[in-house]
Amino acid sequence: MKFPPIEVRLVTAAGNIECLRCTAKSKRSGEQCRKPALKTSRTQKCQFHGGRSTGPKSDAGKARQRASVITSGYHTKEAVETRARSARVLAALEDAMYVLNMTDAPRTRGRKPKGYKPLKTIDNVVQFALDNPLHLPERSGKHRQK
């Protein structure tokens, strides 16, 4: 497929206004964007194709941007890892229920969490139970004295 050459100038308002034309091209049709490029754009793009900003460049600017975006702490690395760990435990518990024939409900659909390893045998279930104690018994004063 041969594409037409990129037009650098855009003439609007019945030939009264001449400006730079956005150089972005469509992936589907191969045609050039028909919007005028921003004057401040280094890459001669319109506001829809990345002509406004290229983001912070310095480490301090990137840190400021990261700090301003995270408002709730939901997307921090620690929060994402905590959610993934909880999802792994739930998926393993579901596997354990099926291995031990405790349910006949349909399996949970969708992708499994990152780092998930399926439990397929009773030995895997026993090892999971030993490695991941879900409820530790609370120790009273009597046990501490011993």
Image (spheres, rainbow, N blue to C red):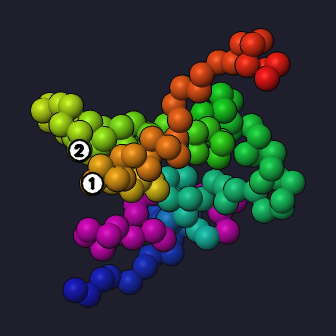
Q: For mark 1, what is the residue?
A: 120
Residue lying farthest front?
146
Is residue 94 positioned above or below 20 on the image? Answer: above
Q: How crowded is mark 1: few (under 14 residues within 10 Å), some or many (20 or more)?
A: some
Residue occupying image coordinates x 26% and y 36%: 97
User: Does the stretch in magenta take in 41?
Assistant: yes
Q: Are marks 1 and 2 in contact (CB under 8 Å)?
A: yes
Magenta segment boundaries in residue numbering: 23-42
Q: Name the residue under label 2.
A: 99
- For label 2, count other residues whose C-alpha is less than 10 Å away and answer few (under 14), some (14-19) or many (20+): some
Image coords of residue 26 (percent x, y): 34, 67
Q: Can residue 146 be seen in this view?
A: yes
Q: Is mark 2 on a helix, strand or loop?
A: helix
Secondary structure mostly seen in the magenta stretch: loop
Disc 1 residue type (three-letter): Lys
In magenta stretch: residue 4? no
